Structure formats: structure tokens, C-alpha cells
Image (tube, coloured by chain):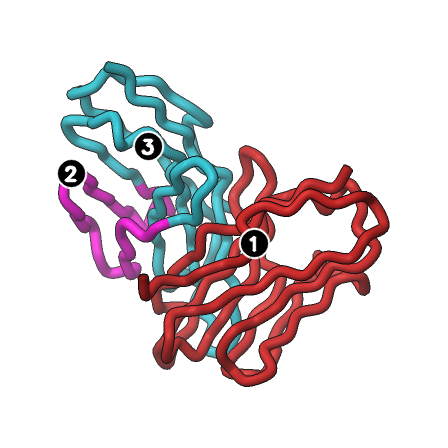
Chain colours: A cyan, B red
Amino acid sequence: KNQVEQSPQSLIILEGKNCTLQCNYTVSPFSNLRWYKQDTGRGPVSLTIMTFSENTKSNGRYTATLDADTKQSSLHITASQLSDSASYICVVSPWIKAAGNKLTFGGGTRVLVKP
Amino acid sequence: DTGVSQDPRHKITKRGQNVTFRCDPISEHNRLYWYRQTLGQGPEFLTYFQNEAQLEKSRLLSDRFSAERPKGSFSTLEIQRTEQGDSAMYLCASSAGTDPSGEAQYFGPGTRLTVL
């Protein structure tokens, strides 16, 4: 069964500090991996999308890395701000050519940034 | 606002009642998805449309659930005879392109359903 596991489940950091979220997946073969940010009570918003050939991708203070050999990804938040408080969801898409949706979502990491 | 919109944002209903949610995707997006998300979990896929055709349904979508996209634009998700276990956030997303596995999905704000 394809799975996406995220860690930690939640974390608290002080404003201005950095943090790193982890995502391990078993989806194979693999097409792409995405990180979404979901504010409380809102829909997820895409931060990054990486294909299997990409190692890193940045979006402002967010930097995602991907190791397709070990099936691991991380999302690094630099100089955290209060507005970074949200759930961060790792989503993996398998390599399937047929029309359809086979995205596998992780359970998310809840980040709380404190002043 | 040209993003994905959902209506209503919140719905409280009594067990056994029917509810219907609406999703308006980003215009010209030909794919539309419905997901269900419970507290502390990631979204779970329910169903998917390409234009007006419903191409895939998850086994999570019981007989009490039905989704339509009659004109290939907005979509509705109906839940009949609601149960307390149906309480969740129902998310809609849309995308455009030729490769559904490779394109970004844009999510709406969701409809939070509470079944009493």
C-alpha cells in the first residue's frame, strides 16, 4: 500500500528560528512530490512541486529537498514568521499515465510559531 | 477572486438529513476533485471529474454520496441520510493540463460539515 509518513506530528518554534519537516514515502514508481501549506479552516495551498529528477526547490523562505533513492523529502522553513503557523502536508503522486487521481497525502505536520 | 470557491463554508445538520455542497473551480480548469479531511489528517480522495465525466470514485464514496458536474463547470456533492461519521471538511480542488498526475491542484477553502 502506498504510504506517506510525516514527522514530527507537530512542533513549536520561536519566531525567527528555522525548522525542518520530514516526509518519507513508499509510493513507487514515483512521479512528483508536493508540499502544501494549510491554514486552520482553509484549503491547502501549494508551496512546491518536485519531479523525481529534482533535488531541491525553493519558494521564498520555504525550501524543499528530495532524495528519490531513499524516498525522503524535507521542507525547511527559514526565519519563521507567525504567519507560518499552519499544517504542512506532503503529497506524493505515482507514475500513472491513465487519467485519474492517485495522490497520496501525508497526515501533515502542525507548526506553531510563537513570538 | 478567481480561485476555487465552495459553498457553504459551514453546514450543521441533523443525522438523517440530506446535504448538498457546491464547488466552483477555477475557470477553464477541466479537472475537478472532491476530498474529505478529518481533523489532524490529510485529505482523502473521494472522486474526480474530467469535464462533465466522473472518471474515478474512491471506495470511500458510499451509495449515500453522489457527485455531479453537469456542464463541466461547477460541481455538487450530495450526502443523503447523513451520519455522524460524515462530519468532516469537504475540499474541492481543480487543475488543468494534460497529465493529472503531474499538474498542481488548486484547493478551495472547504465546507465543514457537522452532523449532530
- Dot 3 or dot 2: first in sequence order is 3
Determine the secondary structure under disc 2: loop
Q: Nearer the viewer, residue B89 or B7?
A: B7
Q: Is residue A98 visible?
A: no
Q: Which mark is residue B105?
A: none
Local crowd size for mark 1, using a 10 Å CA cut-off: few (<14), some (14–19), many (≥20): some
- The answer to whether dots 3 and 2 both sit on one chain is yes
Range covered by the magenta-colored residues = A45-73
Q: Amino acid at mark 1?
A: Pro
Chain containing mark 2: A
Q: Is residue A8 visible?
A: yes
Q: Amino acid at mark 2?
A: Arg
Chain containing mark 3: A
Local crowd size for mark 3, using a 10 Å CA cut-off: few (<14), some (14–19), many (≥20): many
Q: Nearer the viewer, residue A5 or B93?
A: B93
Q: Which mark is residue B8?
A: 1
Determine the secondary structure under disc 3: strand
Q: Amino acid at mark 3?
A: Leu
Q: Nearer the viewer, residue B109 or A56?
A: B109
* Residue at the (55%, 39%) spot, across then down: B41
Determine the secondary structure under disc 1: loop
* Residue at the (60%, 82%) spot, across then down: B70
Q: State the CA–CA distance, disc 2 to disc 1.
A: 33 Å
Pointer 3 residue: A21
- The answer to whether dots 2 and 1 both sit on one chain is no
Residue A27 at x, y percent in the picture? 48, 54
Secondary structure mostly taken by the magenta-highlighted segment of the chain: strand
Discs 3, 2 touching: Cβ within 8 Å: no
Pointer 2 residue: A61
Q: Nearer the viewer, residue B7 or A9?
A: B7
Residue A34 at x, y percent in the picture? 34, 53
